[in-house]
Structure formats: structure tokens, C-alpha cells
Amino acid sequence: EYDMAAMGYADWGGGPVGEPGAHGAHGPSGVPVAELTETAAGPADVRETFTVQTASAGRFTVNGQTPGPLLEARVGDLVEVTLVNDDVEEGVTLHWHGVGVPNAADGVAGVTQDAVLPGQSHVYRFVADQAGSFWYHSHQLSHEQVRRGLLGPLVVHEERPDPAVVDQVALLHAYGDGPTLNGEPGVSELDVAPGQRVRLRVVNTDNGLATVWVTGAAFEVTAVDATDVNDPSPVEDRAVRVPAGGRVDLGLEVPAGGVRVDFGGTTSLVLGRDPTGGAATLPPTEVVDLLTYGRPTDLGLDPTDPDRVFDYRIGKRPGFLDGRPGMWWSINGHLFPDVAMFMVEEGDVVVVRIENGSDDAHPMHLHGHHAVVLSRDGVPATGSPWWVDSLEVGTGETFEIAFVADNPGLWMDHCHNLPHAAQGLVSHLMYA
Ligand code: C2O
Ligand code: CU
């Protein structure tokens, strides 16, 4: 664990208010603060108050529970959440992981707002413009506050959800005393009849890759990071991997014998009956490879003639991070904060080459945008367009991704193994 207060940065270190901001200049946090966009004005369709508090066992709660309450909206809804900090001393924020919110609602302490101190509140307003599975979490001292439970699931429903499908969140989170599924350790049960169709929204809020497998039925990977997979094919005996911060939706029909879904061999969800009779199962050795899964269709952007091409080379080198000597993560050979921002203009098609030359995996998360995977280790993607906001980049792997710069502001692009971010694996995307 790192002492974030020792770093001169509000989130990736630093005090809650009035500290020098990310990159100098104006606004309370030292950065230009975006105005609420016009779409975020007017009466809200969904309106909630989330009060955060310190609880026992080193946990934080949202409205008295951890994980926090399920926030639900319908696509197109204007969502308004008032964050109230009861007593979390270091201050808190809320970040809407995966949602293309206006920059001012991104909830990054030291970048888009100051942390909300005890007794203070902050109003977030954004249009839920994409249906899918998301989550929210504090983005102040994230590596600590997320671990301690300042988080919850966010589901944006389609215009007309199929009423015959049971919609179930499976939020994975490990607390000090072990892994949980929707806050519960061990085996959870969902009482469904044979023939029932289920959409299981797996949300990985931990720092490591989650492995999920299904016993008793075939399943489809219907969505990844809130984007539908085009023409998913049913698979059996294959594990699904969910990067830190990532979401994977599974679709299945419960057979008479029941279904069991295992999460890393630590928590499980039984749908109907347990087809294993309660015996432990091992993860299948074969994995659903999203590079080839599903059927290709239009990307909606042309990556062959990009306006910008960036390298994002991850390494490790000795140096100083906020005055402390050590081995730190580097980006293109530089240590935080001496990392050039990725500068774009609105409308640009941007290609990023992420190369992991370090000895650890990095689940890379870009705020405010979704990017499509073009290739992995030089092998072009041939399946459904694989849109991500959280992408696992393994040791030695190279990914090429592309996105459209369509959401002006200053956005973080960091590792969601949050201690790594606190160790400098942070950069920013900035609109000129
Ligand atoms: Cu879910 Cu910058 O994080
Ligand atoms: Cu990392």
C-alpha cells in the first residue's frame, strides 16, 4: 500500500481540496472545468441521493450498504445523483465507470472536481446514452476506497427490455475477509424455474482478472463493457475472463437440471438447482476469445486512416514518484507525472498501440469513451466488434485499439489494478 497523501495529487495522491491539480491552471482543482452540457439540464428521470459513510470492518457504505444500491435507468434517461459525504475523512467522489458522461460529471478528484468532504455534497447529472452494464465507484484515493467498498452496480436498460428474461447483476468484490458476490460470500441462489432465460451481468470491481465459468448449460456472451456482441454463438465448457473494471453479460436458459456459475472458484451462483450437487468444479481450460467471438459488422469508424496514432508503452523503471525512490510503472519510458498527455481534437479517429513490456498484466481503462480492439499481437480481430472501456493487456501483449474522440474534456486512461495507478500507471487524454 502506498501513502497517497504523500503524493501531490488529489486522486493518485494528495489532499482533497486545494491541492495543485493534475495539470496546472484554472478551476478549483487546477484544471479547466467543463460546463454542464445542455443535455444535462432539465428535470431528471432518475433521481437518487447516495450518502457515503464509514462502517465497521474497515468498510465504507453507500446508503448503509456495500456494495452500494443498484442504480437503474433506461437508455436516454437523465440521471441525477446527489452524493452526500457523511464522514469519510479523505473526501469522496463518484465515477460512472464506462458511461460516456460529460466531463464535468466524471467524478475524478483532482481532474474534474475536488473531493467531497464530510458534510459536503455534489450533484452529478448525465444522460445514460448507452444501454448496458456499468458500475460506479469513488475516484478519490481509489485504490483504497474502492477496495473498502465505495462502489455499486449501474444498469442502463434497453428501451424495451424483454420481460421474459430475468435480469441479474453479479457484482464481484473482495473485502478484507474474502471475495463476495453481490456482497455475499460463498454460494448464492437464484430461484428460477426450468426454461427461464437469464441475463447475468458480471461486474468485476476487483483489481485482478476474474475467471467465470458455467456448469449445466450452454451460454452466450451477449455484451462486453456495455456493448452488445454481434451474433454471439452459444458456447459450452469455456471460461470467460472479465478484466478489472470490466463487465461481461452472459445469456443462458436454465435447464431442468439447473445451472451453476462459478466466479474464480470462490463464489458461485446457483440458478434453480445445482447441477454439480454442490461439488467444486474446475475452470474449463478453454477460454472465450473475444478477438474471434461473434460475427463482424460495421465498426462505425474507419481505423485505416486515423487522425492520431499513439503509443502507450508500459514498462517499469527506477526513479522518483513524488519524491520517493523506487521502481515505478512507466509510460513511453516516462514516470508520472512526466507523461505527455494524449492530445486530440473533437472528431478525431484515434488509434492507440498499447504495449505491455512489463512483468505484470494491466487492465487498462479509458474514461468517457469506448474503444474497439483492432488487433492483438498483430493478429487482427475477426469476431464481433469488440468494444471496451476496460481491456486486459497481459505481459508481453500488444493491442491496437481505435476510438472516436467524441466527448471533449480531460479524461484519465489508467490501469484499473488500482494500486498500479497509485504507482504511476496513469495518463490523460486531453482535447485541444
Ligand atoms: Cu473505474 Cu478511473 O476508474
Ligand atoms: Cu496495472
Image: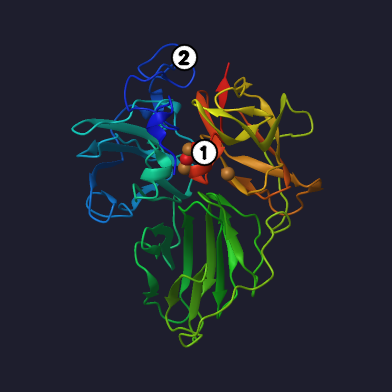
Report if the beta carbon of the residue with label 1 is closer than 8 angstroms to ligand 2: yes
Q: Compared with residue 234, is residue 91 higher up or lower down, i.e. above or below?
A: above
User: Which is nearer the eye, 337 or 84?
Assistant: 337
Question: Does label 2 or label 1 sit earlier along the sequence?
Answer: 2
* Disc 2: which residue: 24
Q: Dot 2 surroundings within 10 Å: few (below 14), some, or many (20 or more)?
A: few
Spot occupied by residue 40 in the image (x, y as percentages of width and height): 37, 29
Spot occupied by residue 247 in the image (x, y as percentages of width and height): 52, 53
User: Which is nearer the eye, 42 or 258?
Assistant: 258
Q: Quadrant of the N terminus?
A: top left
Spot occupied by residue 196 in the image (x, y as percentages of width and height): 46, 75
Q: Is 297 left or right of 111, judged from the image as shown? A: right
Q: Is residue 291 visible?
A: yes
Which type of secondary structure does the marked residue at label 2 adopt? Answer: loop
Q: Quadrant of residue 174?
A: bottom left
Disc 2 to disc 1, C-alpha distance? 20 Å
User: Which is nearer the eye, 329 or 105?
Assistant: 329
Q: Quarter for ligand 2? A: top right
* Disc 1: which residue: 421
> Which color scheme did the rendering employ for the protein?
rainbow
Looking at the rendered structure, the number of numbered marks drawn on it comes to: 2
Residue at 42% across, 20% down: 21
Q: Dot 1 surroundings within 10 Å: few (below 14), some, or many (20 or more)?
A: many
Residue at 38% across, 75% down: 189
Q: Is residue 99 visible?
A: no
Q: Compared with residue 378, is residue 349 higher up or lower down, i.e. above or below?
A: above
